Amino acid sequence: MSFTADRLLLFGATGDLAQRMLLPSLCALHADELVHENLQIIGTARQDFDDAGFRNFARAALEKFLPADRRGSMATFLNRLRYQPLDATNAAGYQALAAKVGPIEQGLAIFLSTAPSLFEPTIAGLAASGLTGDKVRIGLEKPLGTCLESSREINDAVARAFPEERTFRIDHYLGKETVQNLLALRFANILFEPLWNGAHIDHVQITVAETVGLEGRVGFYDGAGALRDMVQNHMLQLLALVAMEPPANYNATAIRDEKVKVLRALRLIDPSETVTGQYRAGAIGGQGVPGYDEELGKPSDTETFVAIKAHLDNWRWKGVPFYLRTGKRLPERKTEIVVQFRHVPHSIFAGRGARSVPNRLVIGIQPEENITLSLMAKVPGLDRDGFRLREVPLDIAMADAFAGPTKRIAYERLLLDLIEGDQTLFVRRDEVEAQWDWIDGIRASWTTHELKPKPYAAGTWGPSAAIALTERDGVHWHE
Ligand code: NAP
């Protein structure tokens, strides 16, 4: 049902995500007058704040995490905030929460920014206190489980109170402008689609590289690892957007129908097509950093790096490897997709000594958003020593091309869509389950083959085996 909620209930309102992303995003939406003037935001967590205390807490977070030029209307934004303390596991506390939320006839959007272990009691408490129903929708943060089975349990618990059309699973990569732009690039231009297949594309690379280490996520990360923390969600969503068939419309059903077909076409891969690693002490940007086990305080078999050669068993992508790699403590922070086209079938310039390099499309997602298409061009000159070609980039630096619009936090888009009820950029249950199905297969093969992560020095691009994974196909990672 289509409605714009006039209440937003934020669980985990005192957490890291709320401080760094959610409160700043909501304040920015308010400053740009994108949320309804009546929208009230009710925060909840165990911390014992009253409304004024929470407003002070939110002000401190905004001053820290929202650029000064987007904070203009902070005082009026803070007036929208209210707070109710609640231990989400305590069923008795939900009536007071419902009283604080007040009437929900105009619509209530709930955002669970808490550990998934709290989802089940939270859903039960919401249901018992009347905070469910046709006018209530719910947004869920990752991780949605640690395997297919646990993901199903979470999804079943949510489904007891919220049907799929009112369940909004967040993958914040989908809120990023360049990720949506990938769809525009593919489907608003005639140039790419005829070439977007195994006949013309040699391979695709997706890299999500972080320079940070554990960053205080000790308890969570050591139980998860790079495969579940990054590949299962963000990287598979990027892969699905690159590989999907053209949807008939830009809407939630059409887009998600096409993405899930891709995810179901992922071939169960052989362990020889994966490399795992764990960082040891090293240096990043000239600064010495400790190894993973030193940060953790104990030895561990958790992978902080993974590289995978993935395959899609369908007509379009037959014979096209998708190389995925992600890791912590890598030399630079970057997220990018590289689409490597094939050589021209015959080079007419070979007889003149000119070497031609195949075209490449690089979609940069982080830290800068830009799109670069490399093309071959003639080097100016009289060519008396032969015809010379050189690769030249055709750059679409998003910041320059669209100098006017503000660069938004991905959560601004997603929170607005949650409040207004547009599911296009949210992940459907069948997608999450197809993702887990593939990831579980990889993990099972690691267990069977007793694969342990290989050490790599912090500040390098992972274990040397990750280089060999592509080099044996004659492919170099794009760096
Ligand atoms: P966090 O900093 O640990 O915050 C957790 C929040 O939950 C706090 O507000 C905490 O407040 C509240 N909470 C904990 N136990 C509670 C209980 N029993 N009842 C009610 N509230 C409770 O975690 P976070 O980093 O904000 O992450 C929140 C969720 O988003 C997690 O599932 C995380 O995996 C996911 N996520 C986070 C990020 C990120 O960048 N931080 C990114 C992607 C996904 P009290 O202690 O006051 O109760």
Image (cartoon, rainbow, N blue to C red):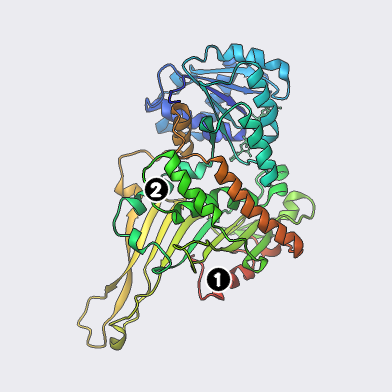
Q: Nearer the viewer, residue 54 or 424?
A: 424
Q: Quarter containing ligand 1? A: top right
- Sequence-first disc among 1 and 2: 2
- Alpha carbon distance from label 1 to label 2: 31 Å
Residue 345: image location, x then y, percent: 35, 77
Residue 351: image location, x then y, percent: 29, 88
Question: Residue 380 lies in what quarter of the image?
Answer: bottom left
Q: Work out which residue is located at the far right of the displayed protein and give it.
A: 298
Which residue has dot 2 on it? 247
Residue at coordinates 28% horizontally, 82% vertically from top-left? Answer: 348
Say whether residue 289 is visible: no
Which residue has dot 1 on it? 470
Assess whether mark 2 and mark 1 are in contact (beta carbons under 8 angstroms): no
Residue 10: image location, x then y, percent: 57, 25
Count of number-bearing discs:
2
Residue at coordinates 67% horizontally, 52% vertically from top-left? Answer: 225
Mark 1 packing: few (<14 Cα in 10 Å), some, or many (20+)? some
Numbered disc in front, either 1 or 2: 2
**Viewed as shown, does residue 462 lie left or right of 121?**
left
The secondary element bearing badge 2 is classed as: loop
Question: Residue 356 lies in what quarter of the image?
Answer: bottom left
